[in-house]
Image (cartoon, rainbow, N blue to C red):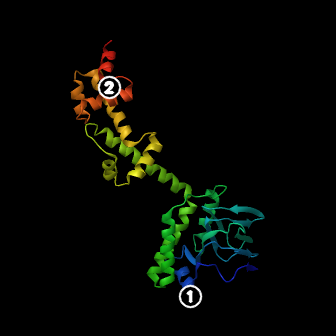
Amino acid sequence: MDNSTLREGFVGQRMITLPRAVKKKAATNPISKSFYVTDIGYYPRAENHFRERENGANEFVFIYCVEGEGWLELHDKYRTVRPNQFFLLPQRETHRYGASKEKPWSIYWMHFDGTMAKDLFVRHEKNRNASDTIPFKSERIRLFDQMYKIFQSNYVEPSLEYANILALHFVISFVYGDVDQSNDAHARNHLVDSIIEYLTDNLDKSFTSQDIADEFNFSTSYLFSLFKKRTGYAIIHFFNLKKTQKACEYLKYTDMSIKEISFSMGFQDPLYFSRLFKKNMGMSPRAYKKAQLS
């Protein structure tokens, strides 16, 4: 039994069922036989969407909810599916799913098969968290749109190979979501570390937030948010704290004048430097130096 309560489709839907000959060719192609798409689509605000398969599907089923809500029943277990949650269904196992009546879901979905499909599903079962929630990334939607357009436009073998490779990339970005997030976090931490190193190596210079953004090729708003979340300070505030820290070393261990220290820290106005120093240290440079001698 394979039931759907709305066979006419949904306003704005996109759906492709690949011809049998195309699927057969993909199943024997050396490149795509490990993973290939058989059906693919997008249902926006899919009111009354419902599927019941007593014998399951012949392929593995992937569904990603981007808005609204739905539900899934598998192995006699019921769960609500909310935005940024996804699920994978095994082949030939009874299941039911559908859209919430109050807030019908919008979903990207795909049926796939191939020699690695079962192992990919097993990996998902081992990796999965309780909710299968994953942060939204616009790159995933662009990837979906790209492969959908290829499946829709032609059945030339190299194009189909490429589309199936994109589809695999799309699915594994969910299956290995925790690894992906970990790598993203590592990349963000590496970026902040690189900025800190750059600032520390250039304490004798004067920078604006835009200068830093241009140096690392990111927007100022992105770097501000990322840097403050990691360090607790805006970039330029942090930069001035590092300058103050270095100035303390000069005041304590050298005979440099306050004017000389000001210039060496990239400040052309010694009075401004003194005010900044007092703000950060609670005393003027002169008072700090005197305190070190007493």
Residue pictured at 72% horizontal, 74% vertical = 50
Q: Quadrant of residue 89?
A: bottom right
Label drawn at residue 21: 1
Label 1 SS: helix
Where is residue 196 drawn, in percent x and y? 36, 41
Task: Identify the amino acid type marked 2.
Answer: Cys
Residue reaching furthest to the right: 76
149 and 1: which one is in front? 149
Where is residue 264 drawn, in percent x and y? 23, 33
Residue pictured at 70% horizontal, 80% vertical = 6
Q: Residues under labels 1 and 2: Cα distance?
A: 76 Å
Q: Is residue 131 left or right of residue 23?
A: right
Label drawn at residue 248: 2
266 and 42: which one is in front? 266
Whether 242 is drawn above or below 252: the answer is below
Task: Identify the amino acid type marked 1.
Answer: Ala
Where is residue 169 drawn, in percent x and y? 50, 67
Marks counted in the figure total 2
- The reply to whether the C-beta atoms of the residues labelled 1 and 2 are less than 8 Å apart is no
Q: Is residue 103 visible?
A: yes
Query: How many C-alpha atoms fall within 10 Å of the one at disc 2: few (<14), some, or many (≥20)?
Result: some
